[in-house]
Image: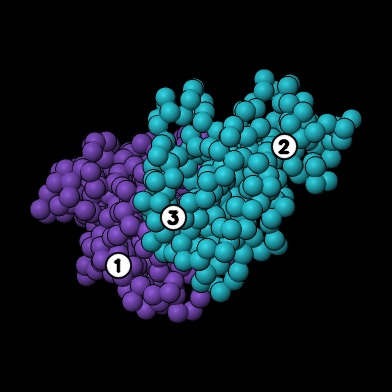
Chain colours: A purple, B cyan
């Protein structure tokens, strides 16, 4: 089943808004795209329109947090990054309780091309002290993680794609900061995040047909990284593969490489991008162009293990 | 020792060991900070967006008896007072040091007060050089669009910025017209404490839109 990340987000935000009167949502004129328009409709008094000004929006969210609110800032990931310095110097430095929840991350805004496709945000957010970085794998994960994100005191970046969210979980039991082990394996460990978790599962099935046993981990919290679970699983395999809809530099692949090189050196292949995106009428064609498919990963594993 | 110094001499003595760190910017901010902190009530908030005027802020705190001699003279030392204001110091709600963000933060606090039906003003101190930052004008639009009349910005119009005169680096005039065009009520006063206090009182009486006080240096 294919669902939508942003639809799941918009609906979950309304649910949480009903329970928690402190939640305030800010928008930079993309509410119909991010689906925060649902929140505006339900709670017009707690929805703040700032116009097309992401930097103002982020700093204003800082003020709301200082005054005791739980501001939720949503925008396209690529354009939220223009406020990186505001996120650094006001939100993260003062450890303010601001929730940054962009949509349209990775290549998911396929039609709009390289300007709109954000393949750097995990790296940019991961480097900031105090920042928690979360990437849900599918639509059912969104409300489960969003609830914990809102309850956590401090700044959080929760990265969402647009509409292509193949179902990974039926009833996810996810805990922020704790990796979710979806499949055990003895030869290869696939560590994935976001939409690539579904690709990792498909990869594992294809590898099984070839007699290769692959484990799959949904690393929905990239920072803080669940090193304990990671190292336990890595110790059993020959090869580790990270999969992300993001640059291999500084993202999940970078995070896993840092831990392994210090604590458990192991052969690692990072699957992700190294270039800017491009326009495509078809999202899946774009994933294929950048090698973010099960077939590509299977080929790489076969080369390595045979 | 320092008690015998007037605020400006105190500022100079604090900044002497640190190569006069932003001395002028602090000097022109002394009376502004002093007026605001005297005017400030318990539910008001002060934001020093031009964070490099921190030394002036510390001198005023010292004058108020909130900092000891030892603390004041620890300015910019490794575990001493931070060179730019940071959250956790008295009256400091938000860290600054990066220009252009304070007005947006102030708007956020004012918006939260409105949602909660709370009173209190938000004073935001801006540098005139800081007005080069586009975010200030984003925030200016947001404040007037939302009618945030609890926001009172004070521009330290001292006519200089880091590498020269404001009018040479990036001209600001006609400054009052710019703020007016963005929907703000503008009050222009000489940068002197009594004039500033009167301007603050006047600003509070004006309802329905945000207010800016342009505090002109050298008039």
The percent position of residue A48, horizontal first and vertical second, equals 40, 65
Screen quadrant of the N terminus of chain A: bottom left
Query: In the visual, does B75 lie left or right of A95?
Result: right
Q: Tell whether label 2 touches label 1 (CB within 8 Å).
A: no
At horizontal 52% and vertical 50% (from top left) the residue drawn is B187
- Alpha carbon separation for disc pair 1 and 3: 32 Å
The percent position of residue B97, horizontal first and vertical second, equals 56, 38
Read off the residue under disc 1. Answer: A35
- Alpha carbon separation for disc pair 1 and 2: 44 Å
Provide the chain ID for the residue under circle 2. B
CA neighbours of label 3 inside 10 A, class few (<14), some (14 to 19), many (20+):
many
Q: Name the element at disc 1.
A: loop
Read off the residue under disc 3. Answer: B184
Q: Name the element at disc 2.
A: loop
Provide the chain ID for the residue under circle 3. B
Query: In the visual, does A238 lie left or right of B192?
Result: left
CA neighbours of label 1 inside 10 A, class few (<14), some (14 to 19), many (20+):
many
Image height of A31 relative to B138, above or below = below
The percent position of residue A110, horizontal first and vertical second, equals 18, 52
Dot 1 and dot 3 within a common chain: no
Which mark, residue B203? none
């Amino acid at each position: 089943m294919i669902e939508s990340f942003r639809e799941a987000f918009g609906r979950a935000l309304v649910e949480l808004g009903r329970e928690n009167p402190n939640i305030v949502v800010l928008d930079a004129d993309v509410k119909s795209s991010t689906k925060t328009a649902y929140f505006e409709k339900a709670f017009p008094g707690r929805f703040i329109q700032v116009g097309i000004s992401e930097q103002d929006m982020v700093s204003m969210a800082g003020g709301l947090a200082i005054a005791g609110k739980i501001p939720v800032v949503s925008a396209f990931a690529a354009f939220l990054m223009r406020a990186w310095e505001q996120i650094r110097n006001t939100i993260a430095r003062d450890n303010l309780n601001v929730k940054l929840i962009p949509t349209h991350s990775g290549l998911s805004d396929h039609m709009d091309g390289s300007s709109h496709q954000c393949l750097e945000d995990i790296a940019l957010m991961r480097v900031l002290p105090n920042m928690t970085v979360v990437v849900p794998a599918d639509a059912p994960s969104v409300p489960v993680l969003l609830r914990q994100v809102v309850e956590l005191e401090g700044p959080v970046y929760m990265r969402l794609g647009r509409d292509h969210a193949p179902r990974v979980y039926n009833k996810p039991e996810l805990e922020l900061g704790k990796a979710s082990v979806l499949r055990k394996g003895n030869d290869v460990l696939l560590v994935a995040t976001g939409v690539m978790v579904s690709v990792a599962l498909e990869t594992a099935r294809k590898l099984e047909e070839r007699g290769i046993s692959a484990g799959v981990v949904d690393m929905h919290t990239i920072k803080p990284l669940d090193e304990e679970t990671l190292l336990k699983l890595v110790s059993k395999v020959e090869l580790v593969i990270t999969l992300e809809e993001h640059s291999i530099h500084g993202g999940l692949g970078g995070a896993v490489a840092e831990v392994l090189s210090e604590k458990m050196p192991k052969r690692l292949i990072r699957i992700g991008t190294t270039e800017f995106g491009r326009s495509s009428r078809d999202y899946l064609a774009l994933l294929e162009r950048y090698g973010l498919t099960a077939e590509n990963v299977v080929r790489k594993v076969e080369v390595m293990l045979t | 020792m320092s008690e015998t110094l007037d605020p400006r001499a105190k500022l100079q003595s604090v900044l002497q060991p640190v190569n006069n760190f932003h001395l002028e910017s602090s000097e022109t901010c002394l009376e502004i900070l002093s007026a605001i902190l005297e005017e400030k009530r318990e539910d008001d908030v002060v934001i020093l967006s031009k964070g490099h005027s921190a030394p002036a802020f510390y001198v005023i705190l010292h004058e108020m008896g909130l900092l000891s001699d030892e603390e004041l003279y620890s300015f910019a030392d490794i575990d001493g007072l931070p060179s730019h204001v940071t959250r956790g110091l008295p009256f400091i709600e938000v860290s600054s040091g990066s220009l252009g963000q304070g007005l947006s933060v102030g708007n956020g606090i004012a918006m939260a007060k409105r949602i909660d039906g709370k009173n209190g003003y938000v004073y935001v101190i801006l540098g005139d050089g800081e007005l080069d930052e586009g975010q200030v004008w984003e925030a200016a639009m947001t404040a007037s669009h939302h009618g945030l009349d609890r926001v009172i910005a004070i521009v330290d119009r001292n006519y200089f910025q880091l590498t020269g005169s404001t009018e040479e680096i990036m001209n600001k005039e006609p400054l009052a017209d710019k703020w007016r065009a963005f929907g703000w009520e503008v009050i222009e006063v000489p940068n002197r404490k009594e004039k500033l206090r009167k301007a603050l009182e006047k600003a509070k009486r004006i309802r329905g839109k945000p207010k800016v006080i342009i505090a002109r240096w050298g008039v």
